[in-house]
């Protein structure tokens, strides 16, 4: 029996961690993640890393709890 293989590259991640805004001025944010919602910060560009940390820090004030979901078709 073989063990399941993990994604070999950042682009292979089949899910996204989605932050829905609580305030009208903020856009929703999504980041590639694994099935457990783990985002590889080392693979994000500087802007995406800052946006992820911003959204994560402001859960409950500017963003709802993030949800793990399949990526949008236009992102593939």
Image (cartoon, helix red, strand yellow):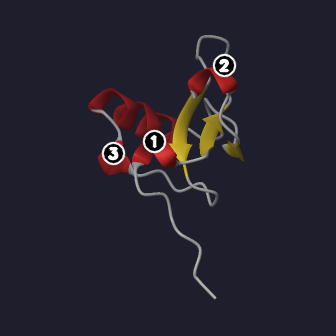
Instruction: Find the residue positioned furthest to the front.
Output: 1
Figure check: 14 above or below 50:
below
Q: Disc 3 and disc 1: Cα gap in Å? A: 10 Å
Q: Nearer the viewer, mark 3 or mark 1?
A: 1
Q: Which residue is mark 3?
A: 43
Instruction: Tell me: 48 left or right of 32.
Output: left
Q: Which residue is mark 1?
A: 11
Disc 2 is placed on an element classified as loop
| Residue 22 visible, this orientation | no
Give the crowd class for mark 3: few <14, some 14-19, many >=20 residues within 10 Å.
Answer: few
Q: Earlier in the sequence, mark 2 or mark 1?
A: 1
Rendered location of residue 42, percent (x, y): 30, 49
Tell me the number on the disc at residue 50.
none
Of residues 19 and 40, the one nearer the viewer is: 40
Of residues 22 and 2, the one nearer the viewer is: 2
Q: Find residue 54 and report its image quarter.
A: top left
Q: Disc 2 and disc 1: Cα gap in Å? A: 30 Å
Q: Earlier in the sequence, mark 2 or mark 3?
A: 2
Rendered location of residue 58, percent (x, y): 54, 37
Disc 1 is placed on an element classified as helix
Q: Nearer the viewer, mark 2 or mark 1?
A: 1
Q: Which residue is mark 2?
A: 23
Tell whether label 3 touches label 2 (CB within 8 Å): no
């Amino acid at each position: 029996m073989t063990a399941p293989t993990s994604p070999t590259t950042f682009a292979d991640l089949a899910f996204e961690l989605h932050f829905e805004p609580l305030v009208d001025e903020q856009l929703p944010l999504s980041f590639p993640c694994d099935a457990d919602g783990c985002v590889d910060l080392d693979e994000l560009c500087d802007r995406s890393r800052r946006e992820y940390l911003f959204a994560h820090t402001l859960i409950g004030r500017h963003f709802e709890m993030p949800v793990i979901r399949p990526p949008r078709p236009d992102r593939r």
